[in-house]
Amino acid sequence: MVMETLKRRVPERERTEQEEYATRGPFASIFGGPVARLFDQALIVGKMEQTITILADSTNLSYKTTKEALEKLIKMGFVVPTRKIGNAQAYQFQVENQMNGLLACGAEFQRTRTDL
């Protein structure tokens, strides 16, 4: 019975830790929402190509939510589709262009935070 209770608690704790990790970034902590989580991911990965599945896993968002947020960022010019990897479309953040100043601001905010 005790072992069974412990097994149920571990996944919940892991989910909480994953959620905290996904929401600790500067943009998610200020603005919240899926687009902010993707901006936080851009701080981490830069120009590295990622699929929707990879982005969804790393931001702790659903596939559908990640796809919708990514489509908004594509329309704004912050993300571009790059190439197909198998059946999956890869995407890349445009960190050199208009995103550069925004990411620098987020990185500076993250460095000066005292609540971590």
Image (cartoon, rainbow, N blue to C red):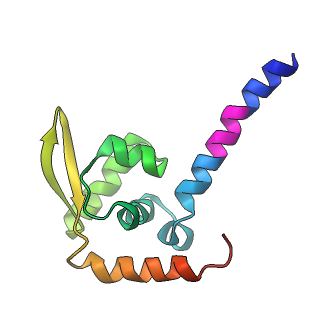
Residue 99 sits inside the magenta stretch: no
For the C terminus, which image quadrant?
A: bottom right
Image quarter for residue 13? top right
Please name the residue shown 64% across and 48% down the image.
Answer: 17
**Outermost residue toward the top in this view:** 1
Q: Determine whether, in the image, residue 93 is placed left or right of residue 38.
A: left
Q: Is residue 21 above or below residue 106?
A: above
Q: Residue at x 31, y 45 (%)?
A: 52
Q: Residue at x 31, y 48 (%)?
A: 67
Quarter placement of the N terminus: top right
- In the image, residue 13 above or below residue 80: above
- Which quadrant of the structure image shows residue 113? bottom right
Residue 11 falls within the magenta-colored stretch: yes
Q: Position of residue 18 (x, y in %)?
A: 58, 47
**Near-viewer residue (7 or 78):** 7
Left or right of 41 in this view: 116: right
Q: Residue furthest right?
A: 2
Seen from the viewer's position, the closer of residues 21 and 72 is 21
Figure disc tally? 0
Residue 12 x/y as whole percent: 69, 37
Dominant secondary structure, magenta: helix
**Residue 29 x/y as whole percent:** 56, 69
113 relative to 53 in the view: left or right = right
Q: Residue at x 38, y 41 (%)?
A: 63
Res 45 → quadrant: bottom left
Q: Range of the magenta residues?
A: 10-16
